[in-house]
Amino acid sequence: MSLAVSAIGQGLLWAVLGVGLYLTFRILDFADMTVEGTFPLGAATAVAAISNGMNPLLATLLAFAIGAIAGFITGLLYTKGHIPILLAGILVMTACYSVNLRIMGRANVSLLGKSTLFKNHFLASLPQYFDSVVLGAVVMIVITTLVIYFLQTELGQGFIATGDNQTMARSLGINTDNMKIRGLMVSNGLIAFGGALVAQNNGYSDVNMGIGIIVIALASIIIGEVAFGDLTLNQRLVAVTLGSILYRFVLLLVLKLGFSANDLNLISSIILAICMMLPVFKNIFNFKHILKRGLDTND
């Protein structure tokens, strides 16, 4: 029971990454590698701020702001510097490594004995692992609601139009470059916010904790889409959270089967690859089924 509760709690906390990446990967229609730098950047910022006496909530919001700045830089390199988005993200991700070391002063900083969002009186009184479930649920309800509301505004519709068809969006008077920059800012701000939450839940920040993060975020998106099929945009945002929880249960099952925790990144990549290839397998199966029916008819 405790393992299931832990998986749900972790799924809710890590779902912030899925929603953040969804804005660029699905709506703006490009993969942003900056997230592998902004996740540990958010963690480093929050942990360093908390270690120096800042209120945990303010430290978490500060992490969002710092992440948004990193996204802004990626957006400038992409839109104004005309650097391909993949390369722009890698450049900022690489720079974040040095920035994280500067912020923390060393490769790893512990929050032992420090106040965090998970150590307030109410959450501390809950049974084991329920603190991450409660806080994660509140955070995801707020974030998902705000994102849904934003996408329904005139600015949000311009954001969606930019991802759908840039030429059409520009013909309607939408500044697509500004939309891309804003999308990257919000996306990386959320990724950094998620990094701050995960770091506080783990009790430490590490300079290498961003490795493979984009695979985890993508897994939340892809598993949610595969598991729940055709959905509206608003429903897809909710499905990202559910996909993140399902992904955690898959990892729990893998560990139960005897695999090492060192294999999780490999297994995550395999799971994601299989999920992304499911439409191909489905098409092959349908083709074979139609072919078989045709041969049976001829007989």
Image (spheres, grey):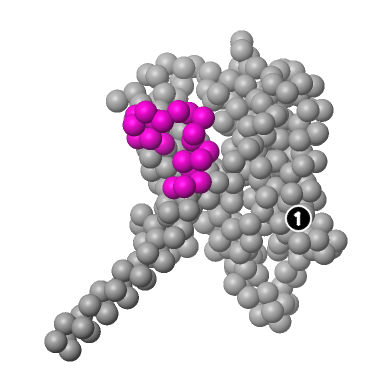
| In the image, farthest residue toward the left | 299
Query: Against 281, is 103 above or below?
Result: above
Q: Residue 294 placed where, x, y %?
A: 22, 84
On the rendered structure, is 133 left or right of 178?
left
Q: Residue 188 placed where, x, y %?
A: 67, 47
Could you tell me if residue 15 is visible in this image? no
Could you tell me if residue 40 is visible in this image? yes
On the rendered structure, is 137 left or right of 92?
left
| In the image, farthest residue toward the right | 81
Residue at image location 68% in from the left, 50% down from the top: 33
- Image quadrant where one finds the N terminus: top left
Tell me the residue that label 1 is attached to. 87
Query: Against 168, is 185 above or below?
Result: above
| In the image, farthest residue toward the front | 299
Residue at image location 44% in from the left, 47% down from the top: 271
Query: Against 70, is 280 above or below?
Result: below
Q: Which residues lie in the magenta part? A: 251-271
| In the image, farthest residue toward the top | 113
